[in-house]
Amino acid sequence: MRQEETAQPDFAFLALARDCAGTIPRFLELLETLRHSGSRITAFVGENGSRDGTRALLQRAEARGEIAVVPTDFMAGEPDRLRRMALGRERLKSELECSGISPRFVCVLDIDNVIAAPPAVTALLGAAEKLDRPGIFGVSATSRPHYYDLLAFEDGQRSFVTLLDDLATSRTGIVRYYRFFCSRIYPDQRALTSDHEIRCASTFNGLCLYRADSYRLGSYLQAGPALCEHLVFNRRLAALTGETMLIDPDLVLRTPVDHAAQSFLPFAWRRLRKLLALPFPRRIQRPNLFAK
């Protein structure tokens, strides 16, 4: 298997995949470009119930020795999305630990529309070098036109653990819902978009690098209320190591369209399309986003 190098890899990539056939090639190209740059790479990808050919693409890549596919069908049994993601991420972490592979760095990433425009390899390697600084256990990507991942972010002044609950209470009408985004979400996303490094206790934003020795200490699982799995993981590492994270302004992804700031009409149209895509029983269970 090509990813099983004789020497230990420099990077282990861990990703979950569901219905992202359109961006799987971009992810595989990133791995191949890194290999051509001289980096040793291994990758574990968990796939869960895709309907668009994602599994077949991953299995072909596995047959070529580019990745290892990890079955994560068990995730479908967890109804809560945050807990479901935590279970999947923890399974990938366990798979890496059981493999006996000892990389220098672990890269946790999303491979859906977040990776449609992969970061430059030089930027990825530069971000890994920043992990050699004292007091840093993780480095995340930023994104343009703006940083988007508020649920995973936390520092001494800002935390977004109530954001999903606040969103739910604002879903009584599309105008109120849009005003919530304009007053609460878009301003914070812009505030976390910078040409300078931002230190924080937790960040993800679609791609995050960890020192492997630190990554082993963490867990995505916790009892109690469901939280973003990256926030749970990073809080634990921060508490155990006394270190912090960085948002790297040079490690840039494209802001996914479903997380990007929008004017009212595109915002309303996108949510109508999402509502119409749901099965009919789920449509009638959801609050009416277009009520006056």
Image (cartoon, rainbow, N blue to C red):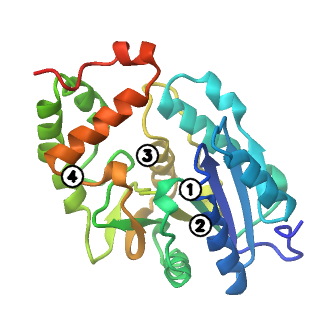
Three-letter amino acid code of the residue under disc 4: Gln
Label 1 with label 4: CB-CB less than 8 Å? no
Is the Cβ of the residue at disc 3 closer than 8 Å to that at disc 1? no
- Cα gap from disc 2 to disc 1, whole angstroms: 8 Å
Looking at the image, is mark 3 or mark 1 earlier in the sequence?
1
Q: Are there few (<14), some (14-19), or many (20+) residues within 10 Å of tag 1?
A: many
- Label whose residue precedes the other's in the sequence (2 or 3): 2
Q: Earlier in the sequence, mark 3 or mark 4?
A: 3
Q: Secondary structure at mark 3?
A: helix
Q: Are marks 2 and 3 in contact (CB under 8 Å)?
A: no
The residue beneath circle 1 is 111
Point out the frontmost of discs 3 and 1: 1
Q: Earlier in the sequence, mark 2 or mark 4?
A: 2
Circle 3: residue type: Leu
Left or right: residue 173 compared with residue 164: left
- Residue labelled with disc 4: 262
Residues at badges 2 and 1 in contact (C-beta under 8 Å)? yes
Q: Amino acid at mark 2?
A: Arg
- Reading the image, the residue beneath label 3 is 231
